[in-house]
Structure formats: C-alpha cells, structure tokens
Image: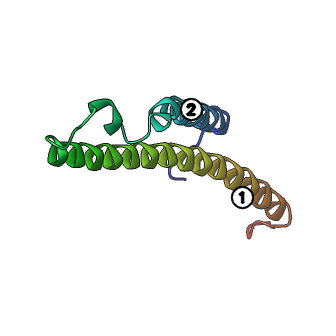
Amino acid sequence: MTGFEIALGAVGQEASRIRTHAEEYHAALDPLRARGDGVSSFGDDGLFGMFVMMYAECRAVAMDVRDGLSMVMDDTGDGLHAVERNTREGEAANAEHMTNVVPPWS
C-alpha cells in the first residue's frame, strides 16, 4: 500500500468546475474577438502606420495566448474526468479479479 488515495468525488467535481471556468473564460473573450484587430479606432492617416502594425501584431499574439489558455483549461477538465473514469474502472476490475484470488496460506 502506497498511502496514495484519490477522492474520486472531489476529482469529478473539480473537473466540472474547471470545465465551467474554461467555458466562461472562453465566452468572456468573445467581445475582444468581436472588436477585430482594434486598429480602426486609431483613425490612422498613415502617420502611425508602424505603431498600428505593431499594435495589431501584439493584439493578435495576446488573443492567441488567451485562446491557448482557454484550451488548456478545457483539456485539464477533460483530463481530470478521464482520471476519475479510469480510476473507477481500474478499481472495479481489481475488485472483480480479487474475488478469484485464493491466498497461498489457505
């Protein structure tokens, strides 16, 4: 015995919470996506062309990072659900096979 235990109910509950948080986070990004690249608000007449180009690139990278974070949260929730499922299935299989084991001292 390793002393390592998994509280499956808590794992499942936290997996659901992380998935919900990921969905809420992803939805919160929608208004930022709807704004487009954001450069039209500058009303640039060509004087700020270099600045506008760098701003648009920085904004695109920032949105990619935010989308990546959303995917990581989503994948983490899925992974925790898989841990819960696999542990339950493993424990059930172990219990089933242990009923057929005869101790060597009997």
Q: Amino acid at mark 2?
A: Ala
Residue that appears at 50% across and 35% down? 34
In this picture, residue 33 sits left or right of residue 79: left
Mark 2 → mark 1, Cα distance in angstroms: 36 Å
Q: Which residue is mark 2?
A: 27
Q: Residues within 10 Å of mark 1 (few under 14, many from 20)?
A: few
In percent of width and height, residue 62 lies at 33, 44
Would residue 83 be seen by someone viewing this image from the given angle?
yes
Q: Nearer the viewer, mark 2 or mark 1?
A: 2
The quarter of the picture where the C terminus appears is: bottom right
Q: Amino acid at mark 1?
A: Gly
Q: Secondary structure at mark 2?
A: helix
Residue that appears at 55% across and 50% down? 75
Above or below, 79 against 36 in this view is below
Instruction: Return the residue nearer the eye: 19 or 62.
Output: 62
In percent of width and height, residue 68 lies at 44, 49
Instruction: Return the residue nearer the eye: 9 or 57.
Output: 57
Instruction: Return the residue nearer the eye: 40 or 96.
Output: 40
Mark closest to the chain's N terminus, 2 or 1: 2
Q: Which residue is mark 1?
A: 90
Q: Quadrant of residue 56?
A: top left
Q: Residues within 10 Å of mark 2 (few under 14, many from 20)?
A: few
Q: Quadrant of residue 46?
A: top left
In this picture, residue 18 sits left or right of residue 12: left
